[in-house]
Amino acid sequence: MNSIFQNIPLNHYILLSTLLFCIGVLGVLFRRNAIIIFMCIELMLNAVNLLLAAFSTYFGDASGQVFVFFIMAVAAAEVAVGLAILTMIFRNTGSVDINSLNKMKH
Amino acid sequence: MTLSHLRKIELKLYLHYNNTKMILSVFYFLAFLAILSALMVVISKNPVHSVLYLIICFFAIAGHYVLMNAQFLAAVHIIVYAGAIMVLFLYVIMMLNLNADVEPHKNKWIKVAATISGGVLMVVMVGALRQSATTVSAGSNANVGLIKNLGVVLFRDFALPFEVSSILLLVAMVGAIMLGKKEIN
């Protein structure tokens, strides 16, 4: 069987995950809509997942893929709680702009 | 060595070369799709478009998992992310009626600073990781991502974290219901 080990160097996956992670960081810094910031956090988690799966496949160790499974569970919990918090914020302030959330400063 | 023998070897080499090129081009296509749609998530003004581009990005990443022969991970990724999380995002966006371009005008310098710092982070990480060529151990087995192997590892070595993650999901469910409820007088 012609597996991917001979075909794609591991460095390609490292670079791809780095680029996806940096795009996620850029989105968190760039946007002010809290929902899009959440989506960029999901993007960063996915970049890390991709790299974990790549290392796990290339070194033949299944623990990495099991860890990706746990990260997915944590991401699902995080999204559920985070979106509940966002709807509560929207109910109280009428927007999801993060600049309107500086009430603690005053 | 006869001529037909040589022809056979030549054909085999050609097929191997072709297969390598095909897998590599599939990888490049999926990587291009993932990065482009991730950029469109950040750039597009309408939040609904952002969600749809993020779904494209997740499907590209699932394609990468299939390419790595991690079939269980690809299936779980599509079910959890595209099936549950992104539907939740779309539902919240439509419930809050955010599908118009409501983002107010932003200070230009903040955008410039965000772009510069993101770009600098990318340059640093790429520069640090470019030289980290790791050699792959030769004895890596290819069917590590099949569901049978993963199930054995998950329930033998990671049984306690598995149970703890179920408690985490239960706590998240209770927390989401508590937060979403109206205030109790």
Image: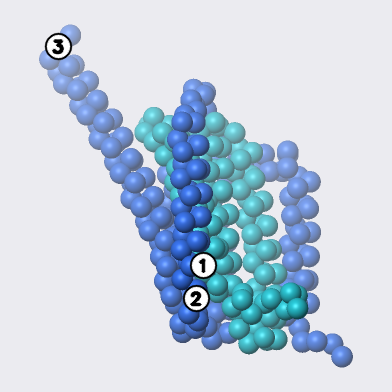
Chain colours: A cyan, B blue
Circles 1 and 2 in contact, beta carbons < 8 Å: yes
Tally of marks: 3
| Residue drawn 44% across the image and 77% down it | B46
* Tag 1 residue: B110
> Percent from the top left, x then y, of residue B83?
54, 66
| Residue drawn 73% across the image and 42% down it | B158
SS for dot 1: helix
Circles 1 and 3 in contact, beta carbons < 8 Å: no
Few, some or many C-alpha atoms within 10 Å of disc 1 (few <14, some 14-19, many ≥20)? few
Quarter where residue A25 is shown: bottom right
> Percent from the top left, x then y, of residue A50?
52, 47
In the picture provided, is A27 more to the left or to the right than B178? left
The tag earlier along the polypeptide, 3 or 2, is 3
Same subunit: marks 1 and 3: yes
Disc 1 to disc 2, C-alpha distance: 8 Å
Comparing marks 3 and 2, which lies closer to the viewer? 2
| Residue drawn 61% across the image and 76% down it | A99
> Percent from the top left, x then y, of residue A6?
39, 29
Disc 3 to disc 2, C-alpha distance: 75 Å
Residue situated in front as seen by the camera: A42 or B15: A42
Furthest toward the bottom, the residue is B185
Amino acid type assigned to the residue bearing label 1 in the image: Ile
The correct choice, above or below, for B138 with respect to B132 in the image is above
| Residue drawn 78% across the image and 53% down it | B164
* Tag 2 residue: B106
Same subunit: marks 3 and 2: yes
* Residue B98: image tag: none
SS for dot 3: loop
